[in-house]
Image (cartoon, rainbow, N blue to C red):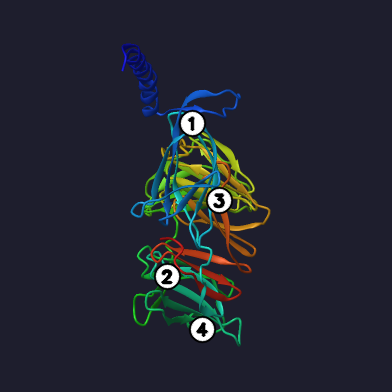
Amino acid sequence: MDNNFKKALAWICVILFLILTPVTILYSQGYRLDWNPPIGRIKITQTGGLFFRILPQPAEIFLDSKFKKTTDFLFGSSLIDNLLPKKYDISIRKEGYYSWEKQLEVKEKMVTAAESILLIPKNIDLTIISTDIENFWLAPDNKNLILKETSSNNENNWSLKLYNLSKKIKSHLIEESDIYAKGADLMGLEFSDNSKDIFLEIGIKEQIKKFDLEISQTPPILKEIKEQSIPIDNIITYKKLGEDIYYLDDLGYIFKTDSSFKQKNQITQTPFTVLPETNYELNKFKDLIFLKEKKTLYLFNQESNLWEKFFEPVSGLVLSPDSKKLVYFSDYEIWTMFLEDIQEQPSRQTGDKILIMRLSEKIKDVNWLNYSYLIITTENKIKISEIDERDKANIVDLVQLPNPKVSFNETDKKLYILSDNTLYQSKPILP
């Protein structure tokens, strides 16, 4: 090998070193050549990534219709890095489940995350629990259902049954004639916090009476409740939260007191204009005070000390299981308000109000499935929707039944659905 060739080879090695070393360093730091940038010219750009956490696992992740990877078996998470900055069409798939699809943007030196993805089963396998059911209530401890049955021979004759969910046993509690032989209307039913009692509101001969039914006893014990009289006669509406009672008086002020009513603290300094012969509903979540007047929802602004119209026409207002969000809805729109800062993407600040969706079908009810998904009932469908509105909220039609009422049991992860006097139970819809 002559000297000229050796020198040429040495220079080639030096040149390659000078070229490849910065390229290698740039590559290790996430820089790539973008061959299709928006401006149409090739450029060097820094990459980003996508992070997912998905239940149930494993699930397959597709970007722009191309398979990328499968989530891990332990945590259901997956990081896809070294992605050029742009928008990606994402599809997450699992056999037997509806796909989750969304377009998300990857930015330079950033990881775009979707950490609360829930894949919904396509078949929820409804089984019949009971028939001739007019209404049902799920106990707070998720162990029992209270069933209101109507006699097939006499629709005006009703009875209450206790259905044990683990043992699948139905037992008799009381019937209408146990309260009043000539007829009684069940106007309301609530559980005690410990699920051992149910409180009944009964209409008897144009009077409303309240009863305590101790369902933990065998046989159950029925006692009439002699209501404690409220020593303030100018109360329009009130809300009991633990030991505290918040109430609106006829001058339009909100006060806080306890069951003794011996001491009271005035919460609002600016009066709300109270209309005569109008129903009002008071709610308090954290430091927020809401007042519903007919179909209009008002919020008290503590900074300005003024009542502000918050939303109309409002149909419902429900706190999330993690107490960090409120969902509120009308006949055709669903919104979420954030009560705390949320760091998880999409990040939110306290007070943010987000429109989740508009539907063409009339909404009957909205409730929380978990802290990031909703159960929506319309006139003949039950839907499941996420609250991540980026690009669009994923929503699926879970089941079609006429006039459904639904409750989700957080213990067994099943839906309990009443439709046409038949009570159904689904298979678990969450892992």
Give the number of the mark in front: 3 or 2: 3
x, y percent for residue 52: 43, 45
Is there CB contact under 8 Å for labels 1 and 2?
A: no
Instruction: For label 1, count other residues whose C-alpha is less than 10 Å away and answer few (under 14), some (14-19) or many (20+).
Output: some
**Quadrant where the C terminus is found in the figure:** bottom left
Residue 243 is situated, as x and y percent measured from the top left of the image, at: 36, 53
Q: Is residue 99 left or right of residue 138?
A: right
Residue 394, disc: 3
Q: Contact (CB < 8 A) between labels 3 and 1?
A: no
Image point 34% across, 75% down: which residue? 216
Q: Nearer the viewer, mark 4 or mark 1?
A: 1
Gap in angstroms between the C-alphas marked 4 and 2: 18 Å
Q: Which mark is residue 107?
A: 1
- In the current view of this chain or complex, which residue is farthest to the bottom? 153
Q: Nearer the viewer, mark 4 or mark 2?
A: 2
State the residue position of label 4.
177
For badge 4, the amino acid type reads Ser
Q: Is residue 20 left or right of residue 236?
A: left
Q: Is residue 232 visible?
A: no
- Report the residue marked by disc 2: 198
Q: If you read the primary sequence from the N terminus, does the residue marked by circle 4 or circle 2 appear first?
A: 4
Vertical arrangement, residue 400 with respect to residue 222, above or below: above
